[in-house]
Amino acid sequence: MANWVPLWLHRLGSPPTFYRFAGAVYPWALGLAFVLGAIALYGGLVVAPADYQQGDAYRIIFIHVPSAWMSLFIYGVMTLAAFIALVWRIKLAETVAMASAPIGAAFTAITLATGSLWGKPMWGTWWTWDARLTSELVLLFIYLGIIGLCHAFEDRRQGARAAAFLVLVGAVNVPIVHFSVNWWNTLHQGATIRLLGPSHMAASMVWPLLTMMGATKFYYIASLFSRVRTELLAAEGGKAWVRELAVAGVAGGKA
Amino acid sequence: MTSPSPLLEARALCFSRQDEPVFGPVDFALHGGEVALVEGDNGSGKTTLMRVLTGMLHAGEGEVLLDGAPFALDTMAGAVVFLGHHLGLKFDLSARENLAVSAGLYGVRAGTSITAVLGDVGLAGFEDEPVRRLSAGQKKRAALARLLLLPARVWLLDEPYANLDREGIALVNRLLRDHAARGGAALVTSHGAVTFAGDEPRRIRLHA
Amino acid sequence: MTPGSTPAACAALLRRDLTLAWRRRGDIALPVLYAVIVVTLFPFALGPEPQLLQRIAGGVVFVTVLLAMLLSLDGLFRPDIDDGSMEQLMLAPQPLALLVGMKILAHWLTAALPLVVVAPVLASMLHLPPPAIVVLVVALAVATPLLSLLGAVLVALAAGAKRSGMLLALMLLPLCVPVVIFAAGAVAAAQDGLPWIAPIAWLGAGLALAVVLAPLACAAALRIAMDT
């Protein structure tokens, strides 16, 4: 592997650099997440027309679909971070992978909860073994397994490395699960109603959806950076840059 | 028998756990025919150093060279044998069966046999007894027999004197002397209570 | 075989693990006993109607075998790590992945094969028709080594952890889902008179991949576990 990759990663991945960078980005990302989220909710709940088949119940897609998308997106980010962490032993990548897991698990749980809320009026039941819901449930278990493994070790870094390995195993497994669950669903003739029908959506439905997708991305960035900053402080507590930060914080009131 | 490059060499070897340095930069070169004693108090990182040298523990900085080549778990091909706090014996098997497994994995030093090495460490008559029934000192002797049996040139012995009586200590010293005479190298940790018989060994000091 | 050669090393390790299992043969019987107990409880819980039992037989036997295997998985590497044998394996001149593969093979022979052998008995207790029993045994013969291999990777990952019992089940579930779907699906298809080769072929493809990749993954995971 080319030599510049680890070099470049090491520079960006140096904890003090990243700590400052994340601290600068965090308020902007959080602010954008709330502003975009508010606009998207207004567009989705007030502006967009009711669906001619599903009435107002469909409006839950403005939460459900961006969450489902995030649950996979975050797994993708974790896979990349875990790969970097294992190959080049970069501590920041371990931290990013492990700090992402609870956020991804939360988005997965929101996807399942909103899917279930939508299912009650549409299917007449809170839970159905629909292929996509089932895959999402398995994804939640993968997230929980990663979080559990990471915390089962006494040595924080060893836990992170083992869990990063599990992230990669899961990345191979997710498509296989999805494929097998689809096969199983056709075998057992599951429910066929879909949350997003094949019909084209009106533009007034599309823009709030896209805006909400942007909002969830920024929320992820804000939440991830805040978690990583905390983790870095905890893990590097004895290092000089943290001590300087603490001294500056006491003296000037602001870090 | 002297080889041009040292059998085992450490260059500026450091190890940190959770960013707390466990041992500082360690430098040493161990040639064939040399035995070195690693000294240090409890918690000074003797066992950690041994595990780093076996390649099981990833060193933070510095490098380990075996025969002049950078050393990795995959490439060292049984050149190193390690005796740690855990003896690596299966208690449900006899000493003979345990050694047979080691021989299968590592091969056998030319001119020895399992029966011969078990006799050599004073376990004649106990070869087929399950290791579970041996005393702590006898278990240790069974593990020491493995050193004699395997062809490895580098011995890493973590506290080999623990649990041994005076005779056992003499046995370890004799094994080390013979190994050095054959051109092998050995690194031995001890918290200092034991003196080598014969030549004054090299000492590597670790500071807590 | 010369001592120290790769075949000799594999044979020595396989013989060691089988001998150890034989010296503690009571432990081999435990998963089988567990499976028998669980399957016996189903008719009491659901009622003895043959139609109902026949409908669920394939799935029940399969899930029971899976859980019984989970019982023994924790003991795959932990004893070796606790008594220092794992260090000896890692320093041996042979590739660790190959040695780990031997350990998995020994585990399958001692922990899974007895379950495959009693599976027809369990299935008959639930009135599964004989043609479907044949398919069940074929499915188990392919799926249990796959489960051993996948489980071994996770056990290796959790080997360095303080506690791993429940964690192992949580980690194994997502990996098991496809295996359970295809194996139980093959039995269900055979019961309905449908072709059942396709799901078995998928399992076989998975097994072929896992035989190659799982020992490598296992060795990497063990290195992480021992890196402490």
Image (spheres, rainbow, N blue to C red):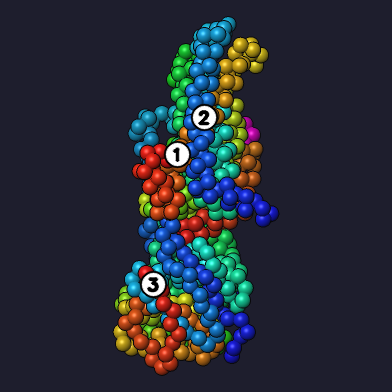
Identify residue for label 2: A28
Q: What amino acid is labelled 3 in the image? A: His
Q: Does dot 1 land on a helix, a strand or a loop?
A: helix
Q: Nearer the viewer, residue C31 or A151?
A: A151
Residue B207, disc:
3
Cβ atoms at labels 2 and 3 below 8 Å apart:
no
Quadrant in the rendering for residue C76:
bottom left
Q: Residue at x 50, y 18 (%)?
A: A38
Q: Is residue A201 above or below residue A18?
A: above
Whichever of callouts 1 and 2 sits on the residue coming sooner in the sequence is 2
Q: Does dot 2 land on a helix, a strand or a loop?
A: helix
Same-chain status of marks 2 and 3? no
Q: Position of residue C43 (x, y in %)?
A: 38, 34
Quadrant showing the N terminus of chain C: bottom right
Q: CA distance from mark 1 to mark 3?
A: 37 Å
Q: What amino acid is labelled 1 in the image? A: Arg
Q: Chain of mark 3?
A: B
Q: Residue at x 48, y 66 (%)?
A: B14
- Local crowd size for mark 3, using a 10 Å CA cut-off: few (<14), some (14–19), many (≥20): some
Residue B41, visible in the rendered structure: yes
